[in-house]
Amino acid sequence: MSEKQEEMTLDKRLALISFNKDPEPFIEVDTKLCQKCEKKPCLYICPAQVYSWQDQLNYNTEGCMETGACLIVCHKIGAKAISWKYPSGGKGVSFKLG
Amino acid sequence: MSLEGFEVAVVGAGPAGSAAALTLAREGVQVLLVERGTFPGSKNVFGGRIYSYALKRLFGDLWKDAPVERFIRKEGITFMTSDSSFSIEYEAKDPKGSFTAVRAKFDKWLAEQAEKAGASLITDSRVDDLIIEGGHVKGIIAGQDKIPTDAVIACDGTTTSLARKAGLATMLEPEEISMGMKDVIELPADKIEERFGLDPEEGAAHVFVGECSGGLRGGGFLYTNKESLALGMVVGADDVSMKTIPSHTVMERLRNHRKVRRFIRDGKTIEYNAHMIPEAGPKMLKRPYTGGMLVAGDAAGHLLNNGYTFRGVDMAIVSGVAAAQTILEARKKKDYSAQSLQIYQRKLREEPALKDMYTFSGVPRYLRNNRLYNVYPELVCNAAEAIYRVDGNGKRKIYKELRAQTKGKVSTISLIRDLLAGARTF
């Protein structure tokens, strides 16, 4: 077995994607609600780990791949704290090999 | 471009939207195709394969102009434990039945065909809302632009805000969605052909079940493009949330399995992408039509995962065409009321390609059985191990060995029930 195996991390993966930052916030989280959220499903569903937890919910929309799954799990399993829409036209992620 | 005078607005230039716009434009309808990405396909992600029949229907022999990566000669499935695997491979008579593609190229090409037929495409434009008067959809709103039309076809994908705004859908349940993720790994064409045992232009599709999903409901896939591999995982959203396993971690599990490592070695990952997959089928909408509007493609649940074939693009195209045909009939009658548009429902049910969704409507429920991911793949591998291993300690006959393997893993009753239910479901 060749040992030339490429090591991939999420950070490396996200660095491969083109983003055009939307100046408008397309994800907004009422993080006060997250304090009481038991399951915090957003931390697990997001394939870009847009959401992280350190004493409170933090989120960084720059890696968002716009799957929209966070909204669903937040509202059905979590604390209904996330409001989410697609970024403005032409903004956000742009895949070359989707 | 003036946004006046369009009869139909199609929202989303994916396969459903472009097929609908193309079909309408060919009949001389003034159609506006609106895409939020900078180009069609830039927001779209799939596993990797398109079934050719849908394109043949749209283009006849000219379907071969489509940006095909490789025609699928080999279909494979691997059941895996952490340190063993059991694979089955089928080599198709004719590889032309399906092909791998890259959405940034394919969707762009399909939208170009719609444009050539006379559709007007605008990109970089997010449709925010519908113009609704007296419960009837009268057009779309994109930023500052209010665009009145006779009808709207919503092909706005899984999250379909338009179907929700029209009151046709409520928010999906976590059980009804999966998260799909993939790495695109660059590899020279000759290496791909050698590694997978393919002739030039031929491709392989492979599915992985078992250890790779780390106890989650889901599995892996691999498709060969011309000079890259599309390697990914699909996992159930509710399962990820309840078991608190970050979805992307299953990608490393898959990549690090010996079987997969050999496929991808020396490869260079060049893109990572992800997409939410609706798994509920057409019942994700109350109905796919309302006064002045039809819904097609992912937005209407027009896709099918029956466990061994994964179909989205072909069904999106066919449903986009069915929506366009419905509009054409309504246009003749000058009647876009819900009553007039309800023939869409019948078209969907009668269309042989789409009927598969109803034939296999029991599949999503069947596939929710976690034994399929956590018990059976291991059982298959362990049985193979016992059958093939000779260690001088004496061997049992195959049937006895199989019975022994199931002990403590699954009760006979569950096993029989799963088999019978499987026979009925598939």
Image (spheres, coloured by chain):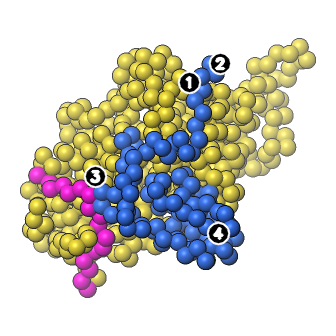
Chain colours: A blue, B yellow
User: Do dots 3 and 2 share one subunit?
Assistant: no
Q: Nearer the viewer, residue B67 or A38?
A: A38
Tell me if label 3 and label 4 are in contact, CB under 8 Å.
no
On screen, B340 above or below B177? below
Tell me if label 1 and label 2 are in contact, CB under 8 Å.
yes
User: Do dots 3 and 4 share one subunit?
Assistant: no
Task: Please report, as a chain letter, where disc 4 is located.
Answer: A
Of the two numbered discs 2 and 4 on the same chain, state the one appearing first in sequence: 2
Would you name the residue on which mark 2 appears? A1
Task: Please report, as a chain letter, where disc 2 is located.
Answer: A
Would you name the residue on which mark 4 appears? A56
Mark 3 vs mark 4, CA separation in Å: 35 Å
Q: Which mark is residue B38?
A: 3
Mark 3 residue element: loop
Residue at 53% across, 72% down: A29
Mark 1 vs mark 2, CA separation in Å: 9 Å
Mark 1 vs mark 3, CA separation in Å: 33 Å
Residue B208, horizontal then vertical, whole percent: 59, 36
Mark 2 surroundings within 10 Å by alpha-carbon count, few (fewer than 14), some (14 through 19), many (20 or more): few
Label 2 is placed on what type of residue?
A: Met
Would you name the residue on which mark 1 appears? B265
Label 3 is placed on what type of residue?
A: Thr
Label 4 is placed on what type of residue?
A: Gln
Mark 3 surroundings within 10 Å by alpha-carbon count, few (fewer than 14), some (14 through 19), many (20 or more): some
The mark closer to the camera, 4 or 1, is 4
